[in-house]
Amino acid sequence: MAARVIDAGGLGELMALLADEGYRVIGPRLREGAIVYDAVAAPDDLPRGWTDRQAPARYSVERREDDACFGFNVGQHSWKQFLHPPVERLWSAERGEHCVRLAAGEDRPEKYAFIGVRACEIAAIEVQDRVFRDGPFTDVAYARRREQAFIVAVNCGQAASTCFCVSMETGPKVESGYDLALTELISGGRHEFLIEPGSQAGGALLARLSSREADGADLEAADAALANAVAQMGRQLDTDGIKELLQSNADHPRWDDVAGRCLTCGNCTMVCPTCFCTTVQDHSDLEGARAERVRSWDSCFTLDFSYIHGGSVRQTNKARYRQWMTHKLASWIDQFGTSGCVGCGRCITWCPVGIDITEEAAAIRAAPGEGGTNGRA
């Protein structure tokens, strides 16, 4: 099915149809001074006319000069929170009179429709697919949520100063992994959306919307929006040989430099759309009649995360930051055949002290070989 064009009314039709199909529709909306992902029912719920400004350790929202629905960049929320929840009950057990009743954590996972998924975020979802769904051990609950998810992607028309998806080859244009893809066309009083199907389900839904066939001018306008995002890209990361570079510089003095600034707060891992570290806790009530096992997000920056008998494996700031960065950009490739970074820039924006992963990688590349290869500090 060829690309079509819809207006804001067509976008509202799309959201209503998804709700009628039983999806919980999630999209961006303005709340408490930030653009977050939450339930939306109509285009007016979207942050129309709002944008954000991002820099290392800096985030703010401000009004735009137009009413763009998607005229902002990715914020602290990612779609990971819906597919891989921050807190999830794995199972529960309740003592009966003559038996113990066991229950799985989630019998019927919620059906989600995501509105406004950027290219880097689709890449992040695909990274988590490799971890939770496509590997030798499948997370059943994740796989069910993922199977039922309907993705409405949005091609970026602008970029933040912290974005570097072009370097990671993950954006700003979506190439796959979506059901429908939107490109917002807004200029000179015009406000429409180029919409393209990416799956059979997406094509079937598009056929039900009020739309017109896209012409050459529409396609040119969409290309111009993408070119604008590429031109605004605020960061770049040289990925040539980066796995070998980081793995052969475990004792580079730059790790000490960044350790002196890093708070090991874990913000970078919490906002990262691909990080998947978790911890598991068992709870019971005071009577011993009910127990449950709960999984929650954790971080390789916490001291307890690498704890084994005798203490923590990574006891210093240096060791924990090095673990995170080398896993993200190097050993992740060994595990999953791809980088764990999609270039969204969240870790830069939401680091309280403004540590920049692209800057740290560039510093090591500028003076490689200054450290040994087997540091354990």
Image (spheres, rainbow, N blue to C red):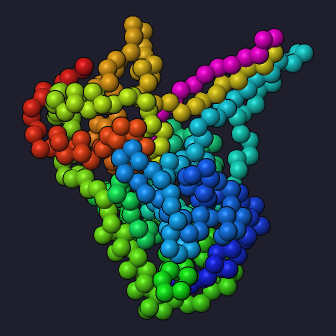
In the picture, residue 301 is in which quadrant? top left
Pick out the residue farthest to the right.
97
Camera-side residue of 174 and 63: 63
Q: What is the total number of numbered labels drawn onto the structure image?
A: 0
Q: Which residues are magenta?
A: 274-288
Name the residue rendered at 46%, 69% in the picture. Answer: 155
Give yes or no for residue 280 being in the magenta stretch. Answer: yes
In x, y percent, where is residue 142?
Answer: 59, 44
In x, y percent, where is residue 346?
Answer: 42, 48
Give yes or no for residue 118 being in the magenta stretch. Answer: no
Image height of 181 relative to 214, above or below: above
Name the residue rendered at 35%, 47% in the picture. Answer: 56
Name the residue rendered at 26%, 32% in the picture. Answer: 258
Image height of 145 relative to 255, above or below: below
In the visual, does 232 lie left or right of 120? left
In the visual, does 307 lie left or right of 194? left
Name the residue rendered at 38%, 80% in the picture. Answer: 224
Camera-side residue of 27 and 98: 27
Q: Is residue 332 visible?
A: no
Q: Is residue 321 visible?
A: yes
Image height of 236 relative to 365, above or below: below
Camera-side residue of 96 and 308: 308
Pick out the residue farthest to the top.
310
| Quadrant of the image containing the C terminus | top left
| Quadrant of the image containing the N terminus | bottom right
In x, y percent, where is residue 153?
Answer: 52, 66
